[in-house]
Amino acid sequence: MQITRAGEYGVLGLLHLARRGPARMALIDDISRDEEIPKSFLAKIFQSLVKAGVVQSYRGTGGGFALTRKPSDITVLEVIEAIEGKIALQRCQLEVPDCEHMEGCALCGLFERAQDRVRAVFAGTTLADLITTEATLPAKTRHIRKLQPAAFK
Amino acid sequence: MQITRAGEYGVLGLLHLARRGPARMALIDDISRDEEIPKSFLAKIFQSLVKAGVVQSYRGTGGGFALTRKPSDITVLEVIEAIEGKIALQRCQLEVPDCEHMEGCALCGLFERAQDRVRAVFAGTTLADLITTEATLPAKTRHIRKLQPAAFK
DNA sequence: TTGATTTAGGACTAAGATTGTCCTGTTGAT
DNA sequence: ATCAACAGGACAATCTTAGTCCTAAATCAA
Ligand code: FES
Ligand code: FES
């Protein structure tokens, strides 16, 4: 599976949360508006993130979502795989492989190596890293501009 | 775009050709049968490879397909991108980006880095490499078993 | 307790991509 | 001429993506 909008929206949504600072909550409605992500789709995505334990949800008035950990402890890999399932460059690389050329095929090994590289890149990047990078980008071309970074413990 | 069956079939088809040795031709019919790839689909795929200059086609009786270069001069990247277009982990990475979060978004940079790694892996592997790897795999689990490797000049 | 607010979860759908098939050429050899 | 083979386009079935929508459940507040 490739990285789809769902994964991208998930990371962007969490970045929004991360920029709010520790334990600050945000409504789906607000995130959706600020990040320009379809609301009901984002709601669905955040359900996966709750299940994966990346965020916690609170219902009712004054509720919303909050990160369960510091942004520097949440990797992009974790977020994307929580939403899309394990990253696989090709069907042979899935948990239950469904490629009929299976069993030690040379090509498979290559796909696996490539996939490992991708996962390593994502595993080595946290939400905090992305926020830091964001700060180095020219302000007018930066995607998220509604909130300033805040300190996490 | 992820690596799809078309790309996989393309590489497998070329490996078949490579195993035949220099300038030996093969019919779509034969490749299709030996590699267990749907014939008309493979025919379509090979059209792209002809256009990309990786193989040459000969029509009429005694025709078929032959590699235009040594297997050690054909990279997997080249083959896959000839068939599927440029490898992109995500839509932001396409030639004409269609992501509305564009313009210096931090996430984009990350996707780009991951994608570069993938392309590097594929760019660093040739058909000859795959054939060599194949030889180290246990015979009964090897995918392609119809032909033995032959020396290319 | 009633009602407003907010997430949870499932069913559903439209559009697009993938994975083919099929038919009609075109080219070349005999 | 005729047969063998690729070329190319139109078409179709299936799957995936990218959502929407509706009902329920939890929570808070008056
Ligand atoms: S088993 Fe699918 S490409 Fe090797
Ligand atoms: S522009 Fe699409 S994720 Fe950055």
Image: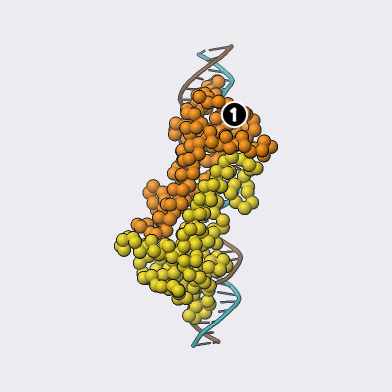
Chain colours: A orange, B yellow, C cyan, D brown
Question: Which residue is depicted at the point 43% across and 52% down?
Answer: A113
On the image, the x and y values in percent for residue A140 come to 69, 37
**Which chain's residue wears label 1?**
A
Looking at the rendered structure, the kind of residue marked 1 is Pro
Question: Which residue is depicted at the point 39% across and 51% down?
Answer: A97
Considering depth in this image, is A118 or B45 the residue closer to the camera? A118
Q: Does residue A45 lie above or below B86 as drawn?
A: above
Q: Secondary structure at mark 1?
A: loop
Considering depth in this image, is C22 or B48 the residue closer to the camera? B48
Question: Which residue is depicted at the point 44% across and 54% down?
Answer: A111
- Disc 1 residue lies near ligand 2 with CB under 8 A: no
- The answer, for residue B38, to whether it is visible in the render is no
- The answer, for residue B145, to whether it is visible in the render is yes
On the image, the x and y values in percent for residue B136 come to 34, 61
Question: Which residue is depicted at the point 60% across and 51% down?
Answer: B94
> Which residue is identified by label 1?
A149
Considering depth in this image, is A37 or C16 the residue closer to the camera? A37
Q: Does residue B9 lie above or below C5 as drawn?
A: below
